[in-house]
Image: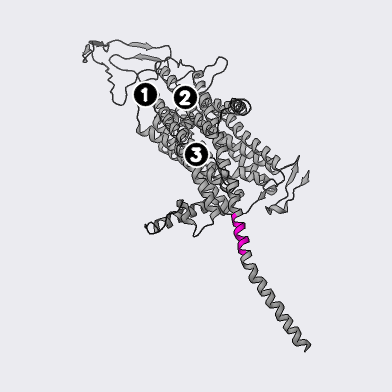
Amino acid sequence: MTDKKDPEKKKVNKGTSKEVFGYPISIFFIVVNEFCERFSYYGMRAVLVLYFTYFLRWDDDLATSIYHTFVALCYLTPILGAIVADSWLGKFKTIIYLSIVYAIGQVAMAVSAIHDITDTDGDGIPNNMSFHVALSMVGLFLIALGTGGIKPCVAAFGGDQFSDHQDKQRRTFFSVFYLCINGGSLLSTIITPILRAQECGIKSKESCYSLAFGVPAALMVVALLVFIVGSGMYYKDEPQGNIMLDVCKCIGFAIKNRFRHRSTRYPKRQHWMDWAEEKYDKLLIAQIKMVLKVLFLYIPLPMFWTLFDQKGSRWTLQATTMDGNFGALVIQPDQMQTVNPILILTLVPIMDIFIYPLIQKCGLNFTPLKRMTVGMFLAAIAFVCAALVQIEIDKTLPIFPSTSQSQLKLLNMGNNSVTVRLPGNDPQEFVNGMNTVVNVSTTSVYFGLIEPLYYSNYSLIKNIQPNSVSMALQIPQYFFITAGEVMFSVTGLEFSYSQAPSNMKAVLQAGWLLTVAIGNFIVLIVAELAKLSKQWTEFVLFASLLVAVCFIFSIMAHFYTYMDPAEIEAQFKKKGDDDEDDKSKRQRPEVEMVKRCSVNSHKEDDKQTRI
């Protein structure tokens, strides 16, 4: 165990950082923190849409819309978190403060799911649903602010703990960090649905959503405490300013300057960003041009996330109408989401070790943009599979009146027979109220004795045919959507990193997260506006939209020219050095002339002194 000292990095160190096996001890606290936080987030998110539909009693469309609004906010707030960390508080304080907000939000969600708080009549249904809705919405907002705000900070803060000579250890850390993300997601998606399926309550026993939200809340508190415990060992950089603000200012000045010189008497410039040259460095302008070129390719990408994030909404709701009995194992509807992280951990090494090298040996130029195109197409296939599964499910479901239909129920409580004639239907005779006591019972419900000319209380009859379509039919759609994720998301991040200038990688990361947020907003727009009567038709609609976008993206990718940002930056830096050399050469004769004059002056003084 050795002390870690690195004076060249000039970090503000408020404690002593030790090393074990070449790794600073501080990163172990960060890794544990990330695992607990991801468990907290994905555990809560796994049961969220069922909480909306079965606890808050929202319909599927409203539940889907609110779910995707929440996910979108989780991918918008990282931009805010990055700006706050880089320009104001620093990464450490940003993680601490927003983790507190995060934990409060998780606790609020757990409290909102306690039905006994407003269940005054003890029937298991809250009597003041507005209280539960309001508290859950506040909780979700705080969670979105917390999880999104710390997202860009934790990994970067972990990377800051390493010295320049620890590149190998830093790479290992990021691999373990990514493993913790998937490990936390996998375990929480298995455990929280089991907790939800338990029954709890004081006045009546209902599905225990409070426990399903309470355990993630406890894990978030643990994550915060673990991070605080390691406080004295961290290297903490002071805020250095956020590059995204500089980029926005430069772009804004270029647009404003171009608008001022819109007259035809001003000569045109090669690129509209060149109008910023009056105020900003040419190297910065060149870097922004490279970023804008990649961001233009991002325009079609939100449609992929529109389909991908429906795993937690539409696909989970689809699983509620299916049979989760796998013999010795019974799967909850929200547990089917575990197929995704399991397949990710399987497919990523298979793709890297076998598939991509095999394609390369076949002589095919399988560029990153081509991989992303194939990934989008695989996601569309996944939704075609989901539509086929939904068609099979619809065959087993009872037929309910649609929004454009009405349902007529007739109860005859009189002494005489009642005949009802409906257009296009044969006459039907309904049962008459009798003068004697009737004993009515079913295999699952006993109504008791019904008095003459009287009616029984309403009772819920559970003797309904169980779901017969196996959840195993969802595995193909999960396979295709995960294979698409590996080819699209993993490759997209790699492509963005390779095409980004050295100081602009955070800008492209923010743009990438923005595509996820926009994709989730598209889901809620379609869910509220389409109003398709059959769910399978909505799946086909999304698949068709993605195929169309995939075709557009393939054309854009065909005309894209790959760049080497390091080479472009080096050219500008070399040009700047050459300009400095030219300037110094022009100044050198003047300096020599001054020197000569100075020497002659000294000689004259010497002569006068001798005389």
Give the mark nearer the N terminus: 2 vs 3: 2
The residue located at (62%, 29%) in the rendering is: 352
- Please state which of residues 105 and 237 is positioned toward the viewer in this rendering: 237
- Mark 2, residue position: 381
Residue type for callout 1: Lys
Res. 403 image quadrant: top left
Residue type for callout 3: Tyr
Drawn side of residue 577 relative to residue 288, left or right? right
Q: Is residue 371 above or below residue 299?
A: above
How packed mark 1 is, by other alpha carbons closer than 10 Å (few <14, some 14-19, many 20 or more), is few
Q: Is residue 14 above or below residue 33?
A: below
As helix, strand or loop, the secondary structure at mark 2 comes to helix
**Distance between the Cα atoms at labels 2 and 3?**
26 Å
What segment carries the magenta color?
Answer: 575-583
**Distance between the Cα atoms at labels 1 and 2?**
19 Å
Q: Quadrant of the N terminus?
A: top right
- Please state which of residues 257 and 5 is positioned toward the viewer in this rendering: 257
- Mark 1, residue position: 534
Label pair 1/2, CB-CB below 8 angstroms: no
The residue located at (46%, 51%) in the rendering is: 270
Give the mark nearer the N terminus: 3 vs 1: 1
Q: Nearer the viewer, mark 1 or mark 2?
A: 2
